[in-house]
Image (spheres, coloured by chain):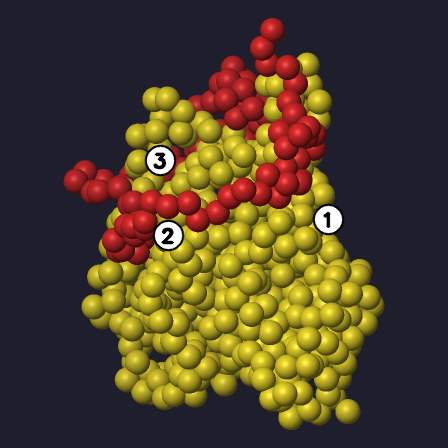
Chain colours: A yellow, B red
């Protein structure tokens, strides 16, 4: 018999409805796999009793032929999402023991659809990082290792726990968030599928804020269909987030398998910087070839401001973060380190509670927003952002979707990248999408010479996630699926 | 523009983060590396360009000006490190 944990969401959904097994059996199978996989450090909190209670409730519904789109499906939830009564710390020391009295809109939507939460997933502290090494709860191990090597690799970040848990089959799917690439980069490094939808597609309410004009929630899943199922359940308009958009959520699954004949696929020349690794280049060409063979038209395009997206991001994101993280003051929640007076209490609390990378970004953000520098940095960066978006607006006259690599390299080793700016370069292909508010999906497309998964990225027009799913499915059909050999 | 140690201390004060003296030189170096990286933006001609305010063109939503939530002091103080009678407790701020 196939292991229950090796079923995709779509497969498990069909078998639950056919009563081949119960939601409780499925949940128990995941709980036992999680217990055997603690060496990956993907979960920071396991909630087996909550999960079993929810699975029993799902079984009661399924028995009556009722239930939502995710009835009885066990998911992992990134620690950035507020989950009522359950540890929610953005993997930071400063939110010690924080247990919200409310539920984020995205997780509430998932639970309304019948999903079962297995626990909270590890991540870079406050979603600031590209390797999951900044978590207060320690690094996450990538389920993938290089050929003939026992060395541990990073899963990417910031949604490193989400990506590793999905790749290791210790959840059926996971929630994640993406501010500069935090869904797509870890998905690419773990052979999973991750989509950052258009800004406004998912409500940000109840998600610990990093950079409010860039943050978006999305799923990481084992394949394109599962990502489509999850996003449909996560997305909604929400009166509690005025930037959430009031337009119907399409049935993304319906477009899977639809012909891409005549689809115009843009290849932006600026995504081939000097020094791009030959295996990434080859992967990209092969991806374009697959789409061409299925009837798509490949069009060379130019997005001239691409190289300025990352420097502009490293003004906008820290600036917004310094403002959002001002609330952690040791008064209303979390850690407090007593000082001589109130100011000293703030300063000691924030020094002890924030990790090194978070402090660095808060300081940069504070600096670029400080008197005399606001126009030179923040306003300038927001102008560059307008130009980045304009590049895409013009591209949409010529193409329907854009194909690029997802990351500049395969997974790397912990401690391999210590220079902050070099770490930031991991997001060079993904960050433009956040700056322009567009949807982007990472889909595994091949292996590196060392046997590690590599991903391609598709970028779409605003609210055209359907074309992304349709095209990603075409790539998946050609590339096949990726399963990490179990060593843990 | 480059950040000296005095500026690091001033910014850390503004950000309400206590920085140890021995960490100041390294922080200054790291902040300068990031600022040097973003200097590239000076190459871009932004004259006449409007700064981005919203990535998705939407009309600001309006709602009725009514109370929609509240009356839950216990929920609000539940996660606070120090409380008394539904108030947050802080060190003395007035003599």
At label 3, counting other C-alpha atoms closer than 10 Å, the crowd grade (few under 14, some 14-19, many 20 or more) is: many
Q: Can residue A309 be seen in this view?
A: yes
Front-most of B62 and A245?
A: B62
At label 2, counting other C-alpha atoms closer than 10 Å, the crowd grade (few under 14, some 14-19, many 20 or more) is: some
Q: Can residue A125 be seen in this view?
A: no
Q: Residue at x 55, y 47 (%)?
A: A208
Quarter that holds the N terminus of chain A: bottom right
State if disc 2 and disc 3 touch (CB < 8 Å): no
Label 3 is found on which chain of the structure?
A
Residue bearing mark 2: A242
Of badges 3 and 2, nearer the viewer stands 2
Q: How far apart are marks 2 and 1 (CA)?
A: 35 Å
Q: Where is residue A97 in the image (x, y as percent from the top left)?
A: 72, 43
Q: Earlier in the sequence, mark 3 or mark 2?
A: 2
Q: In this view, does A441 lie to the left or right of A45?
A: left
Q: Is residue A1 left or right of residue A86?
A: right
Front-most of A75 and A33?
A: A75
Front-most of A423 and A118?
A: A118
Front-most of A28 and B64?
A: B64
A117 in relation to A388, above or below: below
Q: Which residue is drawn at 51% across and 43% down?
A: B70
Q: Quarter of the image holding residue A202?
A: bottom left
Q: How far apart are marks 3 and 2 (CA)?
A: 23 Å
Label ID, residue A378: 3
Label 1 is found on which chain of the structure?
A
Q: Where is residue A317 in the image (x, y as percent from the top left)?
A: 45, 42
Residue bearing mark 1: A138
State if disc 1 and disc 2 touch (CB < 8 Å): no
Q: Position of residue A51 (x, y in %)?
A: 72, 68
């Amino acid at each position: 018999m196939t292991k229950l944990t090796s079923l995709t969401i779509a497969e498990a959904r069909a078998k639950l409805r056919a009563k081949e097994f119960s939601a409780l059996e499925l949940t128990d199978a995941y709980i036992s796999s999680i217990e055997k996989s603690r060496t990956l450090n993907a979960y920071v909190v396991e909630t087996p009793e909550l999960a079993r209670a929810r699975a029993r409730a799902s079984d009661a519904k399924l028995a009556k032929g009722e239930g939502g789109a995710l009835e009885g499906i066990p998911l992992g939830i990134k620690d950035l999402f507020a989950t009522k009564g359950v540890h929610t710390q953005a993997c930071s020391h400063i939110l010690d023991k924080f247990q919200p009295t409310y539920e984020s809109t995205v997780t509430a939507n998932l639970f309304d659809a019948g999903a079962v939460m297995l626990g909270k997933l590890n991540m870079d502290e406050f979603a600031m990082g590209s390797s999951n090494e900044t978590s207060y709860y320690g690094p996450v191990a990538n389920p993938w290792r290089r050929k003939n090597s026992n060395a541990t690799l990073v899963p990417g970040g910031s949604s490193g726990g989400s990506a590793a848990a999905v790749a290791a089959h210790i959840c059926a799917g996971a929630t994640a968030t993406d501010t500069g690439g935090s869904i797509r980069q870890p998905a690419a490094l773990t052979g999973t599928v991750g989509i950052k939808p258009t800004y406004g597609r998912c409500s940000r309410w109840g998600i610990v804020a990093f950079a409010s004009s860039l943050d978006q929630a999305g799923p990481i899943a084992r394949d394109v269909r599962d990502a489509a199922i999850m996003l449909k359940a996560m997305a909604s308009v929400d009166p509690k987030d005025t930037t959430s958009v009031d337009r119907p959520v399409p049935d993304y699954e319906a477009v899977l398998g639809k012909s891409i004949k005549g689809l115009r696929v843009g290849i932006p020349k600026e995504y081939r910087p000097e020094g791009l690794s030959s295996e990434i280049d080859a992967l990209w060409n092969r991806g374009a070839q697959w789409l061409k063979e299925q009837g798509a038209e490949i069009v060379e395009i130019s997005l001239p401001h691409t190289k300025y997206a990352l420097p502009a991001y490293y003004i906008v994101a820290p600036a917004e973060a310094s403002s959002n993280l001002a609330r952690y003051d040791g008064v209303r929640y979390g850690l407090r380190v007593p000082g001589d007076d109130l100011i000293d209490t703030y300063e000691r609390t924030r020094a002890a509670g924030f990790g090194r990378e978070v402090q660095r970004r808060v300081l940069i953000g504070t600096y670029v927003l400080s008197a005399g520098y606001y126009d030179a940095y923040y306003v300038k960066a927001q102008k560059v952002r307008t130009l980045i978006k304009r590049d895409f607006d013009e591209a949409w006259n010529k193409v329907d979707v854009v194909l690029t690599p997802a990351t500049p390299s395969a997974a790397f080793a912990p401690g391999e990248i210590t220079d902050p700016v070099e770490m930031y370069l991991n997001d060079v292909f993904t960050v433009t999408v956040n700056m322009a508010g567009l949807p982007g999906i990472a889909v595994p497309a091949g292996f590196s010479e060392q046997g590690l998964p590599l991903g391609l990225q598709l970028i779409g027009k605003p609210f055209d996630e359907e074309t992304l799913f349709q095209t990603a499915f075409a790539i998946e059909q050609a590339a096949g699926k990726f399963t990490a050999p179990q060593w843990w | 523009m480059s950040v000296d140690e005095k500026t690091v201390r001033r910014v850390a004060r503004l950000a309400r983060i206590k920085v140890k003296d021995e960490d100041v030189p390294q922080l200054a170096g790291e902040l300068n590396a990031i600022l040097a990286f973003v200097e590239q933006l000076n190459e871009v001609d932004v004259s006449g360009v409007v700064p981005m305010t919203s990535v998705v063109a939407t009309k600001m939503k309006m709602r009725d000006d009514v109370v929609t939530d509240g009356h839950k002091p216990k929920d609000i103080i539940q996660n606070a490190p120090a409380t008394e009678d539904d108030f947050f407790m802080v060190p003395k701020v007035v003599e």
